[in-house]
Amino acid sequence: MAFRNVDMAFLCVTVLAVVHCCCGQRMDNEERDIRGILSGADDFRGYLVELAKIVTGTGMLKEKTSLKVVKRSQDNMDSTMLWVKVKMEELLEEKQRAVKKLKAAAEKAMKSYGPYKEFIDFKDVNYFNAKKVVIEKDISTMDNQSRQEITKTINYLPTKPTWSFKPPMMRPLLNSNVSSIHVPTNIYDKSMKILNGVQWTSNLTSQFVANTVEDNTLTWQYFCSSDGFF
């Protein structure tokens, strides 16, 4: 919205400038009427320019950083764009390697698991349900007795700040050793398909960890199943 406001402000300034020029040519014939219009147009134009400065923060940037305009030749621009292209390709290639390794790990795990079992007792399948997980942040305001009771359950997941490549205040609280599983509310989470899928995908956590060790700039990693969970 800010950019739209700036564009509109500069558009209005341009239009008013044209009106100023056009009206100026008719000053001889309609000087009395036009003088008031031009004065109002100048005031309004000044208001819009100041508004544009506030929205874009241009004045603050000039004050804080002594902003200067740097002119670049076409040759410099071409080399800069080429450098950006190469860096983006390198970045994407690193992420693609992680996805390919996860794909290979999933294929291997599913093949090793074999055909889906016809019956599985859901009590034998333990996993962290993403909709029911409780972390330290959620229980920080509880009394000690309540905290102790909750931390004894499977729903409690200890976490710590991660993503060291971000500033300390922006590091999310995560557990880098386990994975949680999300089953949409319109899918029965104790169906045989889901329970089988949960079991064979449990081996993917080790690949998530390995990917993070290899590339510590990875953030979220997912595996999505056609059975309806991830």
Image (spheres, helix red, strand yellow):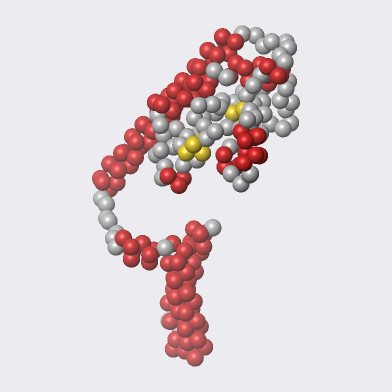
Whole-percent x and y of residue 117? 69, 10
Q: How many marks?
A: 0
Can you tell which quarter of the image residue 85 is in? Answer: top left
Q: Looking at the image, is 187 positioned above or below residue 64?
A: above
**Above or below: residue 29 compared with residue 21:** below
Seen at 52% across and 22% down, the residue is 205
For the point 28% across and 60% down, the residue is: 68
Q: Residue at x 43, y 67 (%)?
A: 53
The residue sitting at the front extreme is 145
Locate residue 120, reporting x and y percent.
71, 14
Tell me if residue 73 comes above or below residue 101 in the rendering.
below
In the figure, is residue 55 to the left or right of 187? left
Outermost residue, bottom side: 32
Name the quadrant of the N terminus: bottom right
In the picture provided, is 107 more to the left or to the right than 63? right
**Image quadrant where residue 199 sits:** top right
- For the residue pair 65 and 195, the one nearer the viewer reads as 195
Please, is residue 146 above or below residue 194 in the view?
A: below
Specify whether residue 157 is in view. yes
Going 49% across and 17% down the picture, which residue do you hit?
104
Q: Which quarter of the rendering shows the C terminus? A: top right
For residue 92, say whether it is visible.
no
- Residue 109 % position (x, y): 55, 14
Q: Residue 71 at what x, y percent from top left?
A: 27, 55
Tell me if 197 is positioned left or right of 170 in this view.
right
Q: In which quarter of the view is residue 49 placed?
A: bottom left
